[in-house]
Amino acid sequence: MRKALNNLLKRWFTQAETAPLKAGTASAETEPAASETPAAVPAPPAEKAALSVPETKLVADEQEIFVAWKPQVAVDATFFDWLMGYPGEGNSLEAEQKILQALFALLASDLNDAVVVPRVPTVIPQLLNSLRNKSVSAGELAQHIVKDVVLVGELINAVNSSLYNPADRINSLDKAIMILGEDGLRLLIAKVAFRPIINLNSGQYTRRAAPHIWNQSEKCAIACHHLAGKLDPFQAFLTGLMKNVGLIIAFRLLDQVCEEPRFRYSRSFALAFTSAAATLSYRVAQRWGFPPEVVQALQQQAGGSKAPNWTPLGHLLHTADLLSKMRVLVNRNQLKSGDERLMVGLNPQAIACFNSLNEINLYEQGGSGKTLLTE
């Protein structure tokens, strides 16, 4: 196994990146840093395939062909640099090899003994069962909630927020569940169940990146739910939450492998790192027993299949991930809100979703049009 990993790394680190990108793409993706060597690591071929085709149709008939939307700004590159806290400024061959080799070794394992991989949140199996069994009532879900003090607190806080503005404070779990409704309840439980994955008692890279990843993951889940169309909205929501679990794991591993507070990294390293992280996400979803449709959509984000062959959920996740990254980056002044390129290729529904993500951070309650405002 070690020999195979070394051979793969050697191939990646001895090839030059020569293919130009389309005009209109931000310079962060088209021009290497001045200090970067010509032999920078190229992006993995599968990753290129996943990013090389144009606009998305989110809801379509079976006869319609899905194509993946490609933004005209360097969304993924800008997001990664922001998570790291600084641009790559070139490359450090030794550091990049060490980090990627550790990531590939983790991917080659069964993940069972990896301390960086979180355990499945205890309530997720019940949620997945409720997803498959529509007859599961809010009362049955409440039986699981009452065992978790954190969940109870989140529910009570949600129904006493300015969204609902009750005349008197609600302290009853039954009343809270009645107000939220079954759909809103499932979404809130899923969000709270995933939160412990963000462990701020980690190293410097994870401490910086994890809260930002979680913020983006919540918005990705919201976008998936909002744009689900004919797809199951709760299943879409869970898929959005899972999208970057692997990225958090990758940053935990980075803390273990890299002792330097800063290291030079190339754009190709960033692509390889995030591609491996996407693979980790679907591997973890498999391990946690997520529905096959969710696992397949996550796997498609890691490359290995062309975008026209993606499932509707895979295309939805691709677009929701980019929309949520753009929203976070605009809110944090990493992208300009007035940049017209941000909206090029998006349909009106996706643009409306992008705008609404500026205000919502948890869920849109089906049928009522209500949203929980948390920003």
Image (tube, rainbow, N blue to C red):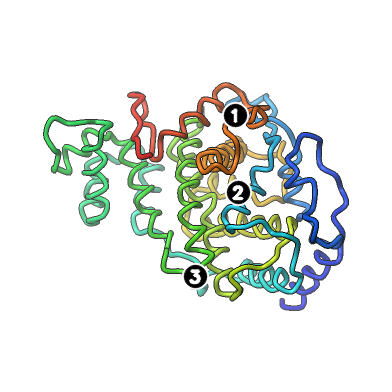
Residue drawn at 79 percent across, 45 percent down: 30
> In what quadrant of the picture does the C terminus appear?
top left
User: Which amino acid type is shown beneath numbered disc 3?
Assistant: Gly
Q: Which residue does the numbered mark 1 point to in the structure image?
A: 338
Q: Is residue 70 above or below residue 196?
A: above
Q: Is residue 262 above or below residue 346?
A: below
Q: Which residue does the numbered mark 3 point to in the structure image?
A: 203
Q: Position of residue 134 (x, y in %)?
A: 35, 37
Of residue 246 and residue 27, the one placed in the foreground of this image is 27
112 left or right, relative to 128: right
Residue drawn at 54 percent across, 52 percent down: 244
Q: Nearer the viewer, mark 1 or mark 3?
A: 1
User: Which amino acid type is shown beneath numbered disc 1?
Assistant: Gly
Q: Residue furthest top?
A: 348
Of residue 219 and residue 142, the one placed in the foreground of this image is 219
Distance between mark 3 and mark 2 Cα atoms: 20 Å
Q: Position of residue 128 (x, y in %)?
A: 40, 48
Q: Residue furthest left?
A: 168
N-terminal label among 2 and 1: 2
Within 10 angstroms of label 3, few (less than 14), some, or many (20 or more) residues? some
Residue drawn at 38 percent across, 59 percent down: 196
> In what quadrant of the picture does the N terminus appear?
bottom right
Distance between mark 1 and mark 3 Cα atoms: 36 Å
**Picture disc at residue 79:** 2
Distance between mark 2 and mark 1 Cα atoms: 18 Å
